[in-house]
Amino acid sequence: MARPIPLFEGLAILAIASAAGAQQPAGAEVKPVKIGIVTFLSGAAAGPFGVPARNGAELLVEAINAGSLPPPYATKGFGGAPLSLAFIDEAGGTTKQVSEYRDLVQRQNVDVVVGYISSGDCLAVAPVAEELKKLTVLFDCGSPRIFEDASYQYVFRTDAHAAMDSVGAALYVTELKPGLKKIAGINQNYAWGQDSWNDFESAIKALKPAVETTTSQMPKLLSGQYGAEISALLSGDPDVVHSSFWDGDLEAFVLQAAPRGVFAKSTVILTAGETAMARLGAQIPDGTVIGARGPHGVYAPDNQLNRWLRKAFFDRYGVAATYPAYHMAQALLGLKTAYEKAGSGAGQEKVIAALEGSSFETPSGTIRMALAKGHQAIEETVYGTTKTVKGQVTVVNVKRYPAEVVNPPEGMKTQDWIKASLKRTK
């Protein structure tokens, strides 16, 4: 059994010492790069999402400072500059996060902010980052609205947005169930859940126009109890149930819906379900379709960086690295690439120019900053179906969808792309 991971309330500061600074030539003082990391450290989202992301940040930054990552990241620091981290708890809502962001920038004087799991927090913080002119990397949130409804100079996102998850899910289930007639959804009632469902439903109907939607349930974020919603799902007898639930809501839904027969009567697709595999294990019914918000965790490719992350994370924390840790790695490795391309001692504007439109290697493969004028990443996505083998949950029937198939092209909004072009990308 995995050992418990302690959770932290409020602000926690971590300064990671580095030999990178100590080994500079005499008189050549190198200013550390101070990174504000924002992730859930308390509440229902902490255990499955926030803490793995925090652990990934600690692990990556220690290795970056030591110069112990595999190539192409074997050099110390960001262009030789050591890194220090300031952690902020994402719990508390958007108003609190805007205040915390201002504190990081104006009082703690961080050089860059990496953060945000909740799409609501990303939408609230992005305009403030632009106001304060501070380089900010969104590492996990998924709403397409961030860059489809606005344009930013100082804000980047190094993971793909919800279109990837929803379109990939639609492609997978229409291949899995060619006779698909009815779908239903249960998603959280805020930007991420709304966008995920809208894109999935639109993609399904672009691929199979005759498919009927029996119900779309939208409970409040962190509701925790889903009795009425489960009854509504069952009453419509759908072939497929879509859910983009994450955090404690995801685990609560599985534990409540499985005994009532939802997973037996319908194929359930959990687009963010990979985090539950380690925590719930065989309690996830066989035949559940699982996503990891990209090629992460069990779906990550067999490359040197992924082999390092899997071993180092398990050795350090006693649990497998899940996709929040992979997303954190993408943000930090993207920044390392940009800082080193910009050159030692380069200012923020040169780092921003280096990150725009870049591509870089990660444990999940190559990430390309291809959308939103080079500020939004694209990547492939992967889905598989659960099967319990000797008491361990595994995935079978794994299918990969290239980035260009599951992400809109530059300059086109997700909904417009789905309605105009998805039939041609099957």
Image: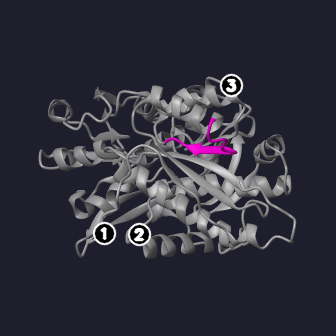
Taking depth in this image into account, of 173 and 371 the one nearest to the observer is 371
Determine crowd level at label 2: few under 14, some 14-19, many 20+ residues with C-alpha closer than 10 A: some
Taking depth in this image into account, of 292 and 356 the one nearest to the observer is 356
According to the picture, the residue beneath numbered tag 2 turns out to be 317
| In the image, farthest residue toward the left | 260
Give yes or no for contact between labels 1 and 2 (Cβ–Cβ under 8 Å).
yes
Sequence-first disc among 1 and 2: 1
According to the picture, the residue beneath numbered tag 3 turns out to be 131
Relative image position of residue 351 (x, y in whole percent): 79, 46
Instruction: Give the quadrant of residue 211.
Output: top left
Distance (Cα) linking label 3 and label 1: 42 Å
Q: Helix, strand or loop at disc 1?
A: loop
Name which residue type carries label 2.
Answer: Tyr
Distance (Cα) linking label 1 and label 2: 8 Å
Question: Which region is colored magenta?
Answer: 107-116
Name which residue type carries label 1.
Answer: Arg
Q: Quadrant of the N terminus?
A: bottom left
Taking depth in this image into account, of 296 and 110 the one nearest to the observer is 110
Q: Is residue 404 visible?
A: yes
Taking depth in this image into account, of 164 and 94 the one nearest to the observer is 94
Give the main secondary structure, helix, strand or loop, of the magenta stretch: loop
Sequence-first disc among 3 and 1: 1
